[in-house]
Image (cartoon, helix red, strand yellow):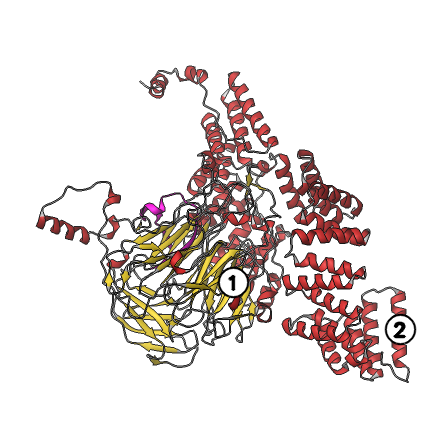
């Protein structure tokens, strides 16, 4: 996506009726127009919030885990997706890592016709042409991407500052860096860049951790697993099942410093990162104490989470337990998986939401502004609904653009679901995904049942990437399901409320880690983060989409850039994407100055 | 007319019992085909017992107990659907028995169906208001449902009867913490901890509560004690479910729990039962061996591990454990063989590489040891012992300057590494090659490690550094410090006598340089 190229008018998507169960008879001319206008004006409550458009729009992909009855641990873990503008045309393209055969057992499901990770180009914008809706075309072959590894996840970032977004594919096996040449093709730059970590990796984060202007890379590694060392584990029923994480040693994470030329130096040891090994599933770079330096929060499966506090100079100190975000309020280390970082309570700091196993609750850790967290899951109403589900990908998503951050969680079990066994499901791990609406008082309501068919289907949900796929001014979600079709959840209602689209730019690339304060008249300032990391094994749209709700009068935009500087910008036009270019705003104060958050 | 509506019509005529006898409710089926054979047999036995009873025209109470018994067996293996059906049938048959809704409540709570679980506990409490565990479970549910006040009310009912009940106090402490009443939280959580001192997870909310009170010292003290053991209400009804589990898996699980809690005799018994249930179980043998080691029965442990290796020669854990045990008690060559097999099976296991390297070094196979140490460092870069072992191996082969340079590099990578700093200090203070020595740097490092950890070895290193600098009186003073520290630690007399000789040697004029 080029700066400024993504401007669209809200309301370009036609209304959908097929989910309502009846099709009206054709109406003559003028009457039909009048009825159409009436349909458009109907309140949102009557419509599904999300509709799956993956198949309609050509995004046909199933993550294939290669399972053949051996219960290899990687089978139950992948995969993810990336929503990123691969060709710089202003719309979001898609990359999916793909599974591969493991061992010698015959897989239960046939392998995909086209193996390896797949790249889909979005034809929403093509040159000067604008389509009404996205259309995805598989361009993997033409792109030069040949990724036959057992892919588990993906991260995105412009590692060589050339204005093109590069891909980092996480794998059970050596990870891969695919450098975007800027002409629609990619080259495998793994060896030259020095980032081919051979461990079992799931998530990664690109962030400028030393503030030198280049994206560094943190890789969350999971466990030490080898096909030859495949322990036999059982469900409580005593049936053979996948092992839990404690059956395997934790694999140490890796931190790579970008030398500035797109190559990396492994600084895991001198940075302090190598000092602790966890079973990392999710990672997010977020400045939890607002000192202007991005910290790293790592969700560890069945272990204390890590909060690597950035001590500057590429040195980190692990303060998870001290900060309150290592364990839940009960002191229990849970099966931490996907992460959402965002300022849901509009107090100017980023809070953390982490998905967990069935039998545990998902956990909401509220930041007090200093990087000290408190588990507020129960009073937020998020405990009970998450108890029966195993959550993976997640994100703060203001789906109704009311200015409040809601939550989406993709669910899918990792040990057999007894109900599915009884139903005769040969791969009995499916659950339903969930949507939680922020009610405005710090409490959330489970609105999954009213959110649309995608939230009623049984799937084995894993990674979720978020972004405005149809550029209509509301956030959509791309959900990856194990052994099932990926779902492109298109938001049907957000665009009805005013919104702002922002892209934080410096040099030729998106400035990941930048924070935006949208100052509104008579309403709380809204804080958002430009990032591609978080969720689970996935990479999201770095553009910042801010729903304004009923308080649409924006007085100014403040940006805290990842290099520690801050600028003020005048209010940009509503219902459009606007680039905010570093150096073109009015500088404000010291590098660590934090604008007033509350009205 | 369908059969169902026909039944209803008969019921209206008071003839329903006739049909009940003719067509008993179907016994809920579960797919037992993939279960462990012992488990499948156990469930089939319970189903058969119920079937037999149904054929004998039992009274409702007896029949309800049989249904509940079957339900409990399903419940034990988390076969939720059939268990629910069985419990509900028991409730239908004997509506006045509070045990059945209590069991159903437990099942539904585990399944995350909280509203239904709360309703069941409510039913149990209506029949037995003194069912304290049900009150605690109800509170657990209410907290999860963001209905804190109701939860607290339930718990206050519990405390009216059992004021020290640990789980109730712990939950009330958590609730107080949630609403910011730190004083109350401390009171409740301390009470809970007194009642259940092994529940070391309670130290975490306690730490948060003390932090809230501004008592950083207490907060820190509790934070360092946080463990993984929580507190649960003693529930005579639901706790019995677990004991119904049979077969290898169940015994392994309970054995592991006992082992983790330090109850070694109980753990050993569980693992033996697991072996009985499946005589070819490798995991049972490995776990039994680990428990036997804890009990000081190394010989029997070795026997079990040899059996495990015979059954599964590629099992890295069995090989690793056997290698370590043999290294301590048996022939080094066999220990090396097993550890080599362990690293072959799990090439990224840094600890296994390090232990193999240590044994190879002990067998004077230095070049092989160095290769293994390299792999250990590569796979576990933060492993100080591996880095130190690598340097020590170089020292043993006379490559002193190489060892020094590597240790300097290691120390840059792990600046807080006390083992490395001490190793380097010792080398710089007393290296056989005088050209490698550097007394000033040795002293700097030696003092730093002493300040961090005042141990005998660290004091001796400082003494050696002073000696290298020719400051014999200081060397003697520090050797005396080492001697005093050793005495305080209860070192044996011959050791102390040797150290005294070193003090005296340093005190003698005429040079003390090593």
Identify the residue at horizontal 67%, vertical 37% (top origin): B274
Frontmost residue, B458 versus A506: A506
Identify the residue at horizontal 81%, vertical 75% (top origin): B481
The residue marked by circle 2 belongs to what chain?
Answer: B
Which residue matches tag 1?
Answer: A219
Give the class, few, some or many, for how many residues have Cα within 10 Å of label 1's Cα (few <14, many ≥20): many
- Asked whether residue A442 appears in the rendered view, the answer is no
| Residue A466 shown in magenta | yes
Image position of B218 with respect to A248: above or below: below
Tell me the quarter of the picture where residue A315 sits.
Answer: bottom right
- Asked whether residue B275 appears in the rendered view, the answer is yes
Which residue matches tag 2?
Answer: B500
Does residue A548 appear left or right of residue A425 in this picture?
Answer: left
Residue B224 horizontal/vertical position (percent): 62, 62
Please say if the residues under marks 2 and 1 sit with CB atoms less than 8 Å apart.
no
Q: Secondary structure at mark 1?
A: strand
Residue A296 horizontal/vertical position (percent): 50, 66
Does residue A222 appear left or right of residue B387 in this picture?
Answer: left
Q: Secondary structure at mark 2?
A: helix
Image position of A312 with respect to B349: above or below: below
The residue marked by circle 1 belongs to what chain?
Answer: A
Mark 2–mark 1 Cα distance, whole angstroms, equals: 54 Å
Give the class, few, some or many, for how many residues have Cα within 10 Å of label 2's Cα (few <14, many ≥20): some
Give the magenta-colored segment's residue range: A442-467
Dot 2 and dot 1 within a common chain: no
């Amino acid at each position: 996506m080029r700066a400024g190229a993504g401007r669209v008018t809200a309301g370009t998507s036609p209304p959908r009726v097929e989910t309502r169960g009846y099709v009206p008879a054709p109406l003559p001319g003028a009457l039909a127009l009048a009825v159409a206008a009436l349909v458009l004006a109907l309140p949102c409550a009557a419509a599904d919030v999300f509709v799956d458009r993956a198949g309609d729009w050509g995004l046909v992909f199933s993550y294939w885990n290669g399972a053949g009855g051996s219960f290899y641990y990687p089978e139950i873990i992948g995969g993810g997706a990336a929503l990123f503008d691969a060709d710089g045309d202003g719309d979001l393209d898609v990359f999916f890592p793909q599974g591969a055969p493991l061992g010698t057992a015959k897989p239960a499901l046939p392998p995909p016709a086209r193996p390896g990770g797949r790249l889909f180009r979005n034809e929403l914008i093509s040159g000067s042409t604008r389509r009404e809706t996205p259309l995805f075309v598989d361009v993997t072959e033409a792109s030069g991407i040949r990724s036959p590894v057992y892919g588990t996840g993906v991260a995105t970032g412009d590692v060589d500052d050339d204005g093109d977004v590069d891909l980092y594919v996480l794998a059970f096996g050596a990870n891969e860096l695919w450098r975007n040449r800027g002409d629609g093709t990619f080259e495998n730059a793994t060896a030259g860049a020095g980032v081919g970590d051979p461990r079992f990796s799931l998530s990664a984060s690109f962030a400028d951790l030393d503030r030198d202007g280049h994206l560094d890379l943190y890789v969350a590694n999971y466990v030490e697993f080898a096909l030859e060392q495949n322990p036999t584990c059982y469900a409580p029923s005593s049936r053979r099942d996948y092992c839990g994480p404690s059956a395997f040693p934790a694999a140490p994470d890796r931190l790579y410093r970008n030398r500035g030329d797109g190559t990396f130096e492994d600084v895991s040891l001198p940075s302090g990162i190598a000092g602790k090994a966890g079973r990392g599933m999710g990672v997010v770079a977020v400045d939890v104490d607002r000192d202007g330096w991005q910290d790293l929060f790592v969700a560890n499966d069945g272990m204390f989470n890590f909060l690597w506090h950035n001590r500057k100079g590429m040195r980190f100190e692990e303060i998870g337990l001290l900060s309150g975000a290592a364990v839940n309020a009960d002191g229990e280390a849970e099966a931490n998986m996907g992460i959402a970082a965002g300022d849901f309570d509009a107090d100017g700091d980023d809070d953390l939401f982490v998905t967990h196993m069935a039998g545990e609750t998902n956990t909401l850790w509220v930041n007090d502004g200093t990087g000290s967290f408190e588990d507020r899951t129960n009073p937020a109403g998020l405990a009970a609904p998450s108890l029966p589900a195993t959550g993976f990908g997640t994100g703060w998503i203001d789906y109704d653009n009311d200015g409040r951050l809601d939550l989406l969680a993709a669910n899918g079990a990792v040990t057999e679901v007894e109900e599915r066994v009884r139903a005769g499901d040969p791969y009995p791990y499916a659950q339903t995904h969930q949507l939680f609406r922020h009610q405005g008082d710090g409490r959330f309501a489970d609105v999954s049942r009213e959110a649309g068919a995608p939230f009623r289907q049984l799937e084995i949900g894993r990674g979720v990437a978020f972004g405005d796929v149809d550029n209509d001014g509301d956030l959509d979600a791309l959900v990856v399901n194990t052994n099932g079709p990926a779902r492109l959840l298109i938001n049907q209602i957000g665009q009805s409320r005013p919104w702002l689209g922002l892209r934080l730019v410096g040099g030729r690339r998106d400035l990941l880690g930048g924070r935006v304060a949208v100052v509104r008249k008579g309403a709380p300032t809204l804080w958002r983060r430009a990032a591609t990391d978080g969720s689970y094994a996935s990479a999201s749209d770095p553009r910042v989409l801010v729903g304004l709700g009923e308080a649409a009068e924006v007085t100014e935009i403040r940006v805290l850039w990842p290099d520690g500087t801050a600028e003020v910008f005048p209010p940009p036009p509503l219902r459009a994407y606007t680039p905010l270019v570093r150096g073109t705003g009015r500088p404000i104060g010291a590098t660590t100055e934090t604008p007033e958050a509350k009205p | 007319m369908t059969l169902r509506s026909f039944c209803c019509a008969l019921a209206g005529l008071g003839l329903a019992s006739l049909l009940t006898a003719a067509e008993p409710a179907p016994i809920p089926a579960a797919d037992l085909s993939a279960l462990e054979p012992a488990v499948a047999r156990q469930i089939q036995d319970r189903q058969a017992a119920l079937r037999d009873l149904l054929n004998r025209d039992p009274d409702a109470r007896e029949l309800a107990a049989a249904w509940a018994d079957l339900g409990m067996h399903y419940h034990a293996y988390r076969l939720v659907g059939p268990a629910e059906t069985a419990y509900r049938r028991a409730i239908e048959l004997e509506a006045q028995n509070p045990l059945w809704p209590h069991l159903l409540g437990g099942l539904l709570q585990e399944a995350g169906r909280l509203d239904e679980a709360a309703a069941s506990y409510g039913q149990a409490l209506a029949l037995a208001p003194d069912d304290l565990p049900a009150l605690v479970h109800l509170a657990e549910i209410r907290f999860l449902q963001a209905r804190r006040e109701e939860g607290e009310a339930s718990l206050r009912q519990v405390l009216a009867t059992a004021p020290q009940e640990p789980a109730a106090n712990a939950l009330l402490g958590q609730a107080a913490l949630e609403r910011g009443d730190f004083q109350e939280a401390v009171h409740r959580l301390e009470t809970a901890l007194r009642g259940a001192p092994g529940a070391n997870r309670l130290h975490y909310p306690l730490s948060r509560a003390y932090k809230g009170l501004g008592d950083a010292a207490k907060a820190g003290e509790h934070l360092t004690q946080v463990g993984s053991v929580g507190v649960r209400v003693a529930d005579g009804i639901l706790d019995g479910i677990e004991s119904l589990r049979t077969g290898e898996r169940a015994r392994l699980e309970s054995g592991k729990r006992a082992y983790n809690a330090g109850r070694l005799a109980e753990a050993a018994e569980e693992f033996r039962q697991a072996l009985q249930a499946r005589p070819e179980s490798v995991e049972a043998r490995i776990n039994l061996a680990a428990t036997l080691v804890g009990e000081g029965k190394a010989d029997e442990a070795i026997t079990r591990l040899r059996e495990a290796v015979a059954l599964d020669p590629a099992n890295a854990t069995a090989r690793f454990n056997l290698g370590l045990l043999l290294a301590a008690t048996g022939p080094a060559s066999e220990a090396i063989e097993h550890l080599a097999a362990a690293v072959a099976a799990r090439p990224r296991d840094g600890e296994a590489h390090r232990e193999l390297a240590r044994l190879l070094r002990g067998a004077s196979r230095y070049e092989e040891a160095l290769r293994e140490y390299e792999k250990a460092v590569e796979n576990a870069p933060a492993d100080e012992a591996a880095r130190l072992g690598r340097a020590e191996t170089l020292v043993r082969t006379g490559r002193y300057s190489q060892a020094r340079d590597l240790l300097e590099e290691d120390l840059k990578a792990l600046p807080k590494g006390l083992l490395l700093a001490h190793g380097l200090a010792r080398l710089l203070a007393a290296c056989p090659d005088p050209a490698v020595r550097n007394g000033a740097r040795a002293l700097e490092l030696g003092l730093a490690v002493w300040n961090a950890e005042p141990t005998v070895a660290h004091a001796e290193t400082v003494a050696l550094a002073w000696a290298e600098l020719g400051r014999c009186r200081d060397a003697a003073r520090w050797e005396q410090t080492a001697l005093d520290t050793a005495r305080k630690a209860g070192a044996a007399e011959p050791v102390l006598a040797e150290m005294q000789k070193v003090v005296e040697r340093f005190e003698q004029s005429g040079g003390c340089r090593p």
